[in-house]
Amino acid sequence: MQINAPSIRRAHRGGLSRSLVTMSKVETIANLVRGALASVAPEAENQPLNPGADFRDQMDLDSMDFLNFVIALHEATGIDIPEKDYPQLASLDGCIAYLAPRLKGR
């Protein structure tokens, strides 16, 4: 699994205990995202992801696949995702940045 390098650097600066919490959160979100992707594109389940690259380019998702991915993220997290925010969910890094503060305390 590829991990978001900026998150690793932020976690490292925060000390050991914060590092474990941050890494755990990043891994949890990455797993949620992978599960949501696999629900709309089963071939994506074992495909390595470039964290900064657009999912639509990496997995050849069409607009309906992407919409179903967003719905799957909503169902997995319980977070309402307005349409204006969809572009922020286009990559693994984007999903982590978008979901991490919204999952705080869950």
Image (cartoon, rainbow, N blue to C red):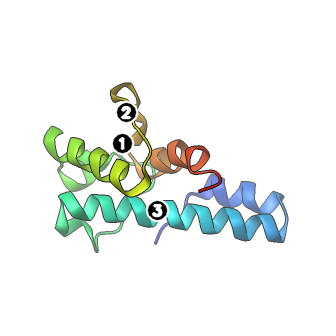
Image location (x, y in percent) of residue 51: 45, 55
- The reply to whether residue 60 is in sight is yes
Callout 1, which amino acid?
Ala
For residue 59, what is the image quadrant? bottom left
Q: Is residue 106 left or right of residue 91?
A: right
Towards the viewer: 106 or 15? 106
Image location (x, y in percent) of residue 16: 82, 71
Image location (x, y in percent) of residue 27: 54, 67
Which residue is rendered at x = 63% and y = 51% of the image? 104
Which residue is rendered at x = 36% and y = 51% of the image? 73
Give the total of numbered labels: 3
Towards the viewer: 80 or 26? 80
- The reply to whether residue 49 is in sight is no
Residue that mark 2 sits on: 87
Cα separation between marks 2 and 1 = 5 Å
Residue that mark 1 sits on: 90
Q: Is residue 24 left or right of residue 44?
A: right
